[in-house]
Amino acid sequence: MRITIIGQQDFGKAVLEAFLARGDEVAGVFCKPEKPGEKPDALRAAAEAAGLKVFQFASLKSPEAEQALRELNVDLGIMAYVLQFAPQSFVSIPKHGTIQYHPSLLPKYRGPSSINWPIARGDSETGLTIFRPTDGLDEGPVILQKRCPIGPDDTLGDVYFKHLFPLGVAAMLEAADLVLAGKHQEVEQDEAQASYEGWFKAEESRINWANHVDQVYNLIRACNPAPGAWCELDGVKVSIYDCRKHPVRTFGAVRGKPGEVVQITEQSLFINAQGGTIEVLRLKPEGGKKVDAGEFARSQGLQAIAGKKSGG
């Protein structure tokens, strides 16, 4: 088939390479322009290395973007991790239209941080959707979906790189074949089941140690490796990454209040939450590098005593 790839970053690159590897013709690649000082986009670099035409329009709504796509004369548009808005006048240009990847089981978790939210909410399952893009955000009819588990200790990195990334690349190929062969079905999304979540940014990733230990643990997992769940320890803002959850199993097992550092070991430190403690293994002080939590505690002179609190 003759296609165009619209996307960016490593996922867009992997999708491009998958189509090229099986012999499909990629007529051109569209990716967002880099900001000043930003490193070259992985998809752009891969496309240029392969000798492909690369287009970087500030807006896909522009007449210039539409004309460029029209001149490629492609069978299908492939949207692989796209943060630019692509209007119907653009995505309908290919002979068989355009398909798009989204890393959630639509209509759940529409929006840009759809991998973080189900982990933070404690869901045991997520997945991906290949759908037809419309002018609504992640609202188009579904072509296919793939499910994957979220293990009780899985981080954002685990779910994405072990499941949603490789499954997504394969699903793009499968969906493209179905559409070109006319064997696909398009199922309208059930708006009664729809949810939209915004960006998982600083406010969403802030740790409230007064929450239940399960909620705190889920939040940290959902932010590892990015954006990093954060709090203050002894007046220093830190992002917490690797950790373990220790629920209360007997009455009175946790001493102290939520947010207090109650134990420090060679490599870790323990912070109280409701119903248990979080053993912090790796953290990153603001402006610094990731270090063992025990090393950080020693460098700061932290002591595991009542009153040594982490700010919420």
Image (cartoon, grey):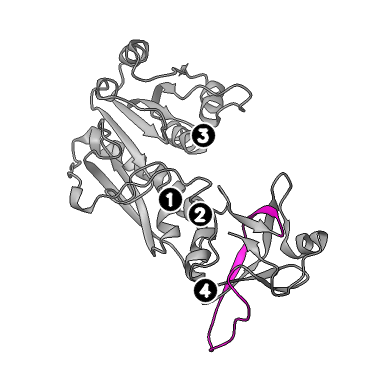
Residue with the mark numbered 4: 274
Q: Residue at x 58, y 51 (%)?
A: 228
> As drawn, which residue projects farthest toward the front?
307
Could you tell which of marks 1 and 3 lies nearer the N-terminus?
A: 3
**Image depth: mark 1 or mark 4 in front:** 4
Amino acid type, residue under disc 3 in the picture = Gln
Could you tell me which secondary element the residue under label 4 belongs to? loop
Q: Secondary structure at mark 3?
A: helix
Figure quadrant of the N terminus: top left
Spatial distance from mark 3 to mark 4, Cα to Cα?
A: 39 Å
Reading the image, the residue beneath label 3 is 9
Q: Are marks 2 and 1 in contact (CB under 8 Å)?
A: yes
The first of marks 3 and 2 along the sequence is 3
| Pointer 4 local density, CA inside 10 Å: few below 14, some 14–19, many at least 20 | some
Q: Could you say where residue 180 lies in the image, as x and y percent from the top left?
A: 24, 32
Q: Residues within 10 Å of mark 2 (few under 14, many from 20)?
A: many
Q: CA distance from mark 2 to mark 1?
A: 7 Å
Camera-side residue: 131 or 114?
114
**159 relative to 168, above or below:** below
Sort mark 1 into few (<14), some (14-19) or many (20+) by Cα contacts within 10 Å.
Answer: many
Vertically, is 291 above or below 185? below
| Residue marked by disc 1 | 115
- Secondary structure of the residue carrying tag 2 is helix
Q: Secondary structure at mark 1?
A: loop
Residue in view at x 59 percent, y 54 percent: 230
Range shown magenta: 234-258
Cβ atoms at labels 3 and 4 below 8 Å apart: no
Q: CA distance from mark 3 to mark 2?
A: 17 Å
Marker disc for residue 156: 2
